[in-house]
Image: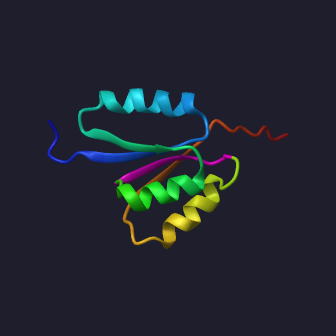
Amino acid sequence: MADKIIRVLLVDDHQVVRRGLRTFLEIQEDIEVVGEASDGAEGVARTEELRPDVVLMDIKMPGTDGIEALRRLRELDNPAKVLIVTSFTEQRT
């Protein structure tokens, strides 16, 4: 068992993505998924409430997207690291 458990908050508007990430992360013995949120505004609120070490967040969500949520998270007195993940692709020609 690891000395320090990494507390993770999942923020994505797709429940199936959150479920998949949770399943993968919970296999890791040094990671605990402490909560989930379905949009950026909820993610900011849950971050204030749960104080995770890491916020794993989608960039493209309805309402408050990942970019705006990141701006709000940076204003908080919270040392959480933020990882932006997305399945959004853009083909450039």
Left-right relation of 75 to 90: left
* Residue for point 37% across, 65% down: 79
| Place of residue 9 in the rendered image (x, y in percent of width and height, measured from the top left) | 42, 47
- Residue at 42 percent across and 62 percent down: it is 48
Left or right: residue 12 versus residue 63 is left
Q: Position of residue 51 (x, y in %)?
A: 35, 58
What span is colored magenta in the figure?
Answer: 53-61
**Image vertical order of residue 51 relative to residue 4, above or below:** below
Residue nearest the viewer, comparing 91 with 54? 54
Image quarter (top left, top right, bottom left or bottom right) of the C terminus: top right
Left or right side of 57 for 81: left
Q: Is residue 65 above or below residue 2?
A: below
**Residue occupying the far right of the picture:** 93
Q: Residue at x 41, y 57 (%)?
A: 81
Numbered disc total: 0
* Front residue (pair 24, 16): 16
Measured along the vertical axis of the image, is residue 84 above or below residue 67?
A: above
Q: Residue at x 14, y 35 (%)?
A: 1
Q: Position of residue 87 (x, y in %)?
A: 64, 35
Q: Is 55 included in the stretch rendered in magenta?
A: yes
* Rendered location of residue 40, percent (x, y): 59, 53
Say how the picture is coloured.
Answer: rainbow
Position of residue 34 relative to residue 82, above or below, is: above
- Residue 65 shown in magenta: no
